Every structure is written in C-alpha cells, then in structure tokens.
Image: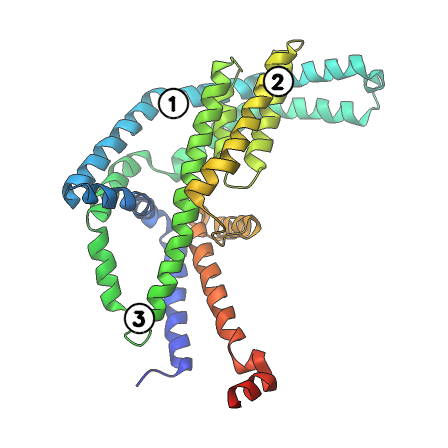
Amino acid sequence: MALPVREQVKYWGIATAVFFAALWFLGDVILPFLVGGAIAYFLDPVADRLERYGLGRTSATVVISLAALLVFVIAALIVVPLLFGQLSQLVAQAPTLLEQMQAGLSQRFPSLADNESALRDMLSGLGEAIRSRGGQLAQGLVNSALSLINAVVFLVVVPVVAFYLLLDWDNMVAAVDRWLPRDHAPVVRRLAGDIDRVLAGFVRGQVSVCLILGTFYSVALMIVGLDFGLVVGAIAGLITFIPYVGSIVGGGLAIGLGLFQFWGDWWMIGIVAAIFVAGQFVEGNFLTPKLVGGSVGLHPVWLLFALSAFGTLFGFVGLLVAVPVAAALGVLTRFALEQYFGSRLFRGLAGRADEDA
C-alpha cells in the first residue's frame, strides 16, 4: 500500500531540506566534489561514444583524462598567463583611455569643456575611480579567486573525483535507479530523464557554444591586432549563454577599444564589428541549433534569477548548483502544471460532466 500523500510530501521535504543544509554548512568542503561531478557529467557522453567505438570504460576514461590533461597544460602555460597579463594592462590603461575619450568628445562637442557639464564630471569621476581602485580591484579579484578555490586541493581532488565518477558513472546511475520507491519509479525516471535532457541541452550545449565563440572572438581579434583582444573574446564567450548579451557586450567593448586604437582606419573598425556580426550569425544559425537544440525550458530571466539567488545564499557553490536546480525546478513545475490541468480542481464541474458522459 502506497504511503499517503501527506507522508510522501513530508519525506520529500526532509530530503530537500537536507540538500540545502548540506550546501549551507558544507559548501567549501563539497566544492571540489561538485566540480568533479560536473566534469564527469559533462564528459559522460564522450565516454559513451568511445565505448561504442570499441573502447572499454576504463580505456575511454583514461583517453579523456589524458586529453583533458593536455588541454589543461596548454591553458596553464599559454592562455591563462596571457589572459591575466592583458587584463592587468587593460586596468592600468583604462584611465588613459578615458582621458583620450574625454578629449575627443570635447573637441567634437565643445559644451563638454564646461566645468559644470554632467558628462564631463561623470567621465572624470570614472577615470579617478579606475585610477585609484582599478589595480586594487584586479588584485582583489585574483586574491578572492585564489582564496575561494584552494589551488592545491582543486588541482589534486577535482581530477581524481572526476576520473572515478566518470569511470563508475553508469554503475552509479543504475544503483540510484534501484533505490527509487517502486510506486514512483516510473514517474521519477521520467522526470529525471526530462531534467537530464534540459541539462544536456543547456549545460553541455551552451558550454560548447561559449567555448567555441570565446575562442573564435579571441583569436580573430588578436589576428586583426586589437589590444586586449583575448580579454574581450573571453568576456564575450563567457556570457554568450545569455542570448545576444555576449555579442552586444563583447562587440561594444571591442568597437570601443578599436575606436581608440584604429581611429581614422575605419575599415579596421569595420573588421572588428564584422567579427561579432559573423559570430552572432554562426551562433544563431549553426552552433545553437546543432549543440543546444530548440527550447530546453530554461528561460534566460529564470536562469539569471537562479544564479543570483543561489550565489547570494550559498556563494560559489550556489553558482555551481544553480543551473541544475533551476532545470529541476522547471521540469517539476511543468509536471505539476500537467497534473493540475488534468485535475478536478482545474476542470471543475464541466470536466466531471465529460467524465460521466
């Protein structure tokens, strides 16, 4: 005999409370394990494909791990130092760039030369703020990142956790399936499959789109000779998961920097703009349809709310679990609506008359 609905709600509520309590009290401890689990989840389809090509699970995991190690070494030796170097240069030169912009605007719009001009005061204040605090901000960001993520623990624990979880992923899924309540196993499997499709479509797909576009923007901007092209491309790629925002923000930064660097060479500024137009075209017509697919049920506004709420409540760990939790809540909400639309509460007397007929 199945448990009454009230008892089921109580037990599922306790499980939810335990989950959030673990995030609250063990956030820093479980961070490497969450990251390792996310990496294993992201790479599981790759391992499955290698198995279909004839490799065993162990061999597939070793191949993926060696490839990931190679990418990490290349990033650590080349990309990361170059990225931080350009970021530091950008912060250091930002006051000079603002002064040049203020001088250029003053020449074209003499009214800005007025000491009482609001725009002049704003630009002057922004330049002073960047000059006085820009270096501190950059250093603070680096220090915060290093204090948040213990480099030694991360470099040791995360790869080990990811390796073993990827190796045993199918066995763990099968074990969890055996633990499901028998009365609710079909529904839970269906909901879990829907959540997995949302995450596979959004997380795996959007991460791939962000990496491809970020690499394209960075390489293309560096080829045309734009200063800080790597930083601009990285920023644009990082926020590409928000529709149009990545290209608008990245394009605005690139064109703004191009105006200072290539002033008078309008064709160079046009090339910079064309890079982002091409990136947006490729994303909308090829990358997103192919890698992400159609609607995956995660509206950008809902996603931003989840990131903000979980980041505020649980810190960096909250940011990591925000997307999976948002996906799960979205699927559960749609399931609840399906039940509601089929219920007597929604259909009322008209629905009862249809049933009787």
Label 3, label 1: how many angstroms apart (C-alpha)? 47 Å
Ranked by sequence position, the earlier of labels 1 and 2 is 1
Q: Find residue 70 and report its image quarter.
A: top left
Give left or right: position of 121 versus 307: right
Q: Which residue type does callout 2 highlight?
A: Gly
Q: State the SS at label 1.
A: helix
Determine whether, in the image, residue 119 is placed left or right of residue 163.
Answer: right
Residue 79 is marked as 1
Q: Nearer the viewer, residue 67 or 15?
A: 67
The residue singled out by tag 2 in the image is: 270
Is residue 151 depicted above or below 52 in this figure? above
Residue 144 position in % (x across, y down):
44, 35
| Residue 45 can be seen in this image | yes
Q: Residue 114 sits in which quadrant? A: top right
Reading the image, the residue beneath label 3 is: 185
156 left or right, relative to 308? left
Mark 3 element type:
helix
The front one of 352 and 101 is 352
Q: Earlier in the sequence, mark 2 or mark 3?
A: 3
Q: Amino acid at mark 1?
A: Val
Question: In the rendered structure, are the residues bearing label 2 and label 3 in contact, judged by CB atoms less than 8 Å apart?
Answer: no
From the viewer's perspective, is residue 270 above or below residue 199? above
Disc 2 packing (10 Å; few <14; some 14–19; many ≥20): few
